[in-house]
Every structure is written in structure tokens, then in C-alpha cells.
Amino acid sequence: MAGIEDMIVILRDAGAPLVLLWLLTLAVVYGMLHHAKIPQSNTAKGVIALSAAFLVLLASAASPAVAFLQNLVVAGVLIAVGLLVAVIFLEIGQVKTGGTHIFMAHPKFFGGIILLILLSVFIGAGGLSVINISVPEISDTLVAIVIFAIIIAVAFWFMYKEGMPGGDKK
């Protein structure tokens, strides 16, 4: 019997009651909309049912979800401002590769950078704790050292690039 009790505890800790609540809300709302034949489109019924299910889930798990969303919004605004400043500097510098704009020349590279930034914002806002994944503690000092090392590496890369025979010597 201990195995069944352990399994129930593991499922409860993993958030199974919240998933079941979400599924129940989704099924009930979709069923009511289908029975009342409002709206005619199945896609619209699905969107309404999904929205209602997520609202119920948000209301039931309010405290961790609100803290996560608050951190996510704050981090998103800071990252957006940082990206805007970076784009402004790239535009001021008129950075081009082979006559085309750098964003058009390397779309996969910049898309990958954006995805890494979004993943970092999700993790930094506490998204892993919302989905019950433990996060190792990373100190502020380590983050500062890594950022400083990246800045130094980029500076050396620019200096190395300018010193090359095909570099941007002026």
C-alpha cells in the first residue's frame, strides 16, 4: 500500500490537481458552448474554453502564478529596453554585411539569440519553480563575472577583427 500512497503524493506534488482542474474546466466550458451552439465555429469554442480554463487555473494557483507573471513582466520590459538600445546602436553604426542589413544577413543567429534571451527571462522570473523543477542557486557575483567576461570577449573580438587584413581599418 505504501507504493500507491507514494504515487499519490508524487502526483499531488507534481501539480496533478491543477491539471485535472484545468481539464475539467476546459471540458465543461466546451461542452456547454457546444450544447448551446454558441458560437458556430469549433475554433472559437476551443479558444473560449481554453481561455476560461487558464483563467480558472490562474485563480486557483494565484500566489505563485502572480509572482511569476510579475517577475516575467519586469524582466521582459528590462530585456526589451536592452534590445532596443542594442538595435539603436546597430542602426547608428550602420552595421551591414555584404551590403545587406545585419539582421537580414543572419536571421537564424539573431533568432537564436532572442530565443536564448526568452529562455533566460523565463528561468530568471521563476518559471522553473512554477513547473516544479529545482533551480541551482547562482550568485550575483557569478552572473557579474560571466557578463564581464562576455563583454571582454566581444571587445577582444572587435579589436582582433579590426587588426585583420580584411578588417575595418579606417
Image: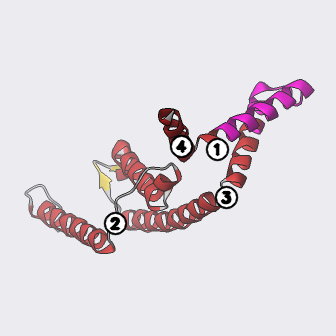
Q: Main secondary structure of the magenta part?
A: helix
Q: Nearer the viewer, residue 19 or 70?
A: 19
Q: Which residue is mark 2?
A: 93
Dot 4 lies on which element? Answer: helix
Dot 1 lies on which element? Answer: helix
Q: Which residues are magenta?
A: 20-48
Residue flagged by tag 3: what amino acid is it? Ala
Q: Which residue is mark 3?
A: 62
Name the N-terminal-most of marks 4 and 1.
Answer: 4
> Do we see residue 80 in this rendering?
yes
- Label 3, residues with CA under 10 Å away: few <14, some 14-19, many ≥20: few
Estimate the spatial distance between the alpha carbons at disc 3 and disc 4, rounded to whole Å. Answer: 22 Å
Q: Which residue is mark 4?
A: 9
The residue drawn where x is 50% and y is 42% is 10
Q: Position of residue 21 (x, y in %)?
A: 70, 40
Dot 2 lies on which element? Answer: loop
Estimate the spatial distance between the alpha carbons at disc 3 and disc 1, rounded to whole Å. Answer: 12 Å
Q: Nearer the viewer, residue 85 or 5?
A: 5
Q: What colour-coding does the image apply?
A: secondary structure
- 61 displayed left or right of 156: right
Q: Which residue is mark 1?
A: 18
